Amino acid sequence: MYDYDPTRPKWEQIAEVLRDRISSGGYPPKHKLSEVQLEAEFDVARDTVRKAVRALRAEGLVVTRIGMGSFVAGRPETDKSPA
Amino acid sequence: MYDYDPTRPKWEQIAEVLRDRISSGGYPPKHKLSEVQLEAEFDVARDTVRKAVRALRAEGLVVTRIGMGSFVAGRPETDKSPA
DNA sequence: CTTTATTTGTCCGTATGTATG
DNA sequence: ACATACATACGGACAAATAAA
């Protein structure tokens, strides 16, 4: 289980963990971030997970599509799309 | 119960007690200072408790976060934040 | 096309706690 | 002691979008 710092919001701490997984490569581009899955892993309400994901989305680290899910965003420049 | 010195503000005396608990380790870092709880323990109004907490906050002994609560501050040096 | 399942979006309410008046 | 506002956190319910059978 996770040891949450009571002086800071859970969603913020969860966002940090996810941000770290993304930057470390643990969560590669296209990796799916399921709300229900994160809800279970971090043992929090969906509302809390959504706040964390929203933060990452605001940072451009993840993209969300209704009915599909949230995914780790590929780096803006270094995408292998042919010119 | 507490024996308050009538010649001095209650909040000041309460602040002293709390300051002592913090420095003695009775209240370790991250320990929560609930206004409701202190209100009951010291048998004073919430305003009185708030004045005491405000004093400790001004001294940097506690940190307060909106919607979360007031907590004993960790020492400035021993923060686990990397960068 | 319809049904089912999955997932995000949005709204409701409840509870706790701080900030302010 | 009361009321209002805001922030966190939890839980439920339904809608919308997507995909697959």
Image: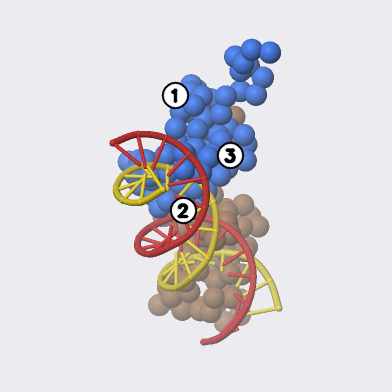
Chain colours: A blue, B brown, C yellow, D red
Letter of the chain that mark 2 sits on in the rendering: A
Q: On screen, D15 above or below D5?
A: above
Q: Are marks 2 and 1 in contact (CB under 8 Å)?
A: no
Q: Are marks 1 and 3 in contact (CB under 8 Å)?
A: no
Secondary structure under tag 2 reads: helix
Quarter holding the N terminus of chain A is top left
Kind of residue sitting beneath label 1:
Gly
User: x and y percent of residue B46 in the render?
Assistant: 54, 75
Between residues A71 and A47, which one lies in front from this camera angle? A71
Instruction: Count neighbours of disc 1 (C-alpha within 10 A) and say few if under 14, some if 14 to 19, many if 20 or more.
Output: few
Letter of the chain that mark 3 sits on in the rendering: A
Instruction: Count neighbours of disc 3 (C-alpha within 10 A) and say few if under 14, some if 14 to 19, many if 20 or more.
Output: some
Kind of residue sitting beneath label 2:
Asp
Marks 1 and 3 sit apart, C-alpha to C-alpha, by 18 Å
How many marks are shown on the rendered structure? 3
**Residue at point 49% right, 26% down?**
A30
Kind of residue sitting beneath label 3:
Arg
Secondary structure under tag 1 reads: loop
Instruction: Count neighbours of disc 2 (C-alpha within 10 A) and say few if under 14, some if 14 to 19, many if 20 or more.
Output: few
Q: Are marks 3 and 2 in contact (CB under 8 Å)?
A: no
Letter of the chain that mark 1 sits on in the rendering: A
Secondary structure under tag 3 reads: helix
The residue under label 3 is A57
The residue under label 2 is A47
**Residue at point 64% right, 12% down?**
A82
Q: Earlier in the sequence, mark 3 or mark 2?
A: 2
Quarter holding the C terminus of chain A is top right
The residue under label 1 is A26
